[in-house]
Image (cartoon, rainbow, N blue to C red):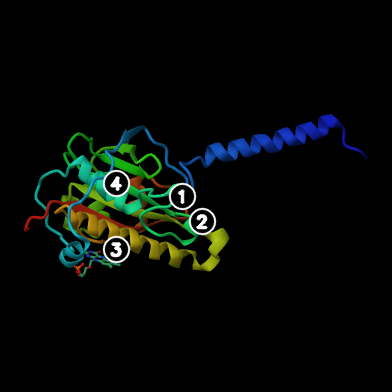
Amino acid sequence: MKPSAKAILAIVATIACAGVAHHLLTWNEGAGPVQPRVKEWIELPPPTDMDMPLREALQKRRSIREYLPEPIRINQLANILWAAQGITHGHGFRTAPSAGALYPIRVYVVIKKGGVDGLPAGVYVYDPHRHALGLVRTGDVSAPLMRACLGQEWVGKAPVDIVLVGYESVLRPRYGDRSFRYMAEEAGHIGQNIYLACTAMGLGTVAVGAFHDDEVKKILGITAPDAVPLYVFPIGVPAER
Ligand SMILES: Cc1cc2nc3c(=O)[nH]c(=O)nc-3n(C[C@H](O)[C@H](O)[C@H](O)COP(=O)(O)O)c2cc1C
């Protein structure tokens, strides 16, 4: 039986609609994991020189767990986020390497009340394509985040915590069982960029790997089953310089 032109048209329209629906449901800014719903976008100032020779930054990098109770500046936060995942070349290539340039890691930012001048406390997501922060939820969640990190005080006291979240499903189709390993390796690259940017600007951070995944996800409002928090980086002005 030959399908009528009408039937063919209906099939094509259904496929097209499904494609559009899928695109809308999984819409995100460029490649990578699904973008969370964002209430408001805040453009960040462009990255600036961090004024410390690389040798000196490598020499001085240390894990810092005590911070002064003062905010960090928005341009400092912008520099750290750019160092973590900033777009540096065409095709979306970034400051940190990524297996197959698939970029499975999303950078979340938890801002404590008064943590960054001019920004309300809340959970934000960094969009490297816009070099902007997307407000996901308002409110100071630094205390629950500290509890989720086994009570590590530096997480609760830092004016800002950066959380790296990996989405394994971005890598699975290409890398199968090696996906988790690649994601963790990439988090290491991003983490070292965060350490060096902080050091170069006189800020302190520490890589925190001890936390309850489910609690961290809940605090950030992440429901994707494949999402895995990989690292938390509290950031602040060091108490001892
Ligand atoms: C995978 C990983 C997990 C870590 N987890 C924690 C942590 O949960 N809490 C913490 O205070 N430090 C943590 N650290 C930081 C180490 O304690 C620190 O790097 C180490 O003491 C060496 O000190 P340095 O970073 O100043 O060279 C972690 C480091 C790595 C690489």
Q: What residue is pinned by disc 3?
A: 209
Q: Which mark is residue 169?
A: 2
In what element is the residue under mark 1? loop
The Cα atoms of the two marked residues, 1 and 4, are separated by 18 Å
| CB-based contact (under 8 Å), mark 2 and mark 1 | yes
Give, as a three-letter code, the residue at label 3: Gly
In what element is the residue under mark 3? loop
Q: Which mark is residue 111?
A: none
Give, as a three-letter code, the residue at label 2: Ser
Decide if ligand 1 comes within 8 Å of the CB at mark 2. Answer: no
Query: x%, y% of residue 161?
Result: 24, 50
Give, as a three-letter code, the residue at label 4: Val
Number of numbered labels in the structure image: 4
In the rendered image, which quarter is residue 205 located in?
Answer: bottom left
The Cα atoms of the two marked residues, 1 and 3, are separated by 20 Å
Q: What residue is pinned by disc 1?
A: 224
Decide if ligand 1 comes within 8 Å of the CB at mark 3. Answer: yes
Foreground: disc 3 or disc 4: 4
Foreground: disc 2 or disc 1: 2
Q: Residues within 10 Å of mark 2 (few under 14, many from 20)?
A: some
The Cα atoms of the two marked residues, 3 and 4, are separated by 16 Å
Q: Is residue 154 left or right of residue 16?
A: left
The Cα atoms of the two marked residues, 4 and 2, are separated by 22 Å
The Cα atoms of the two marked residues, 2 and 3, are separated by 21 Å
Q: What residue is pinned by disc 4?
A: 109
Q: Residues within 10 Å of mark 3 (few under 14, many from 20)?
A: few
Residue at 70% across / 38% down in the picture? Answer: 15
Query: x%, y% of residue 52?
Result: 17, 56
Q: Earlier in the sequence, mark 3 or mark 4?
A: 4
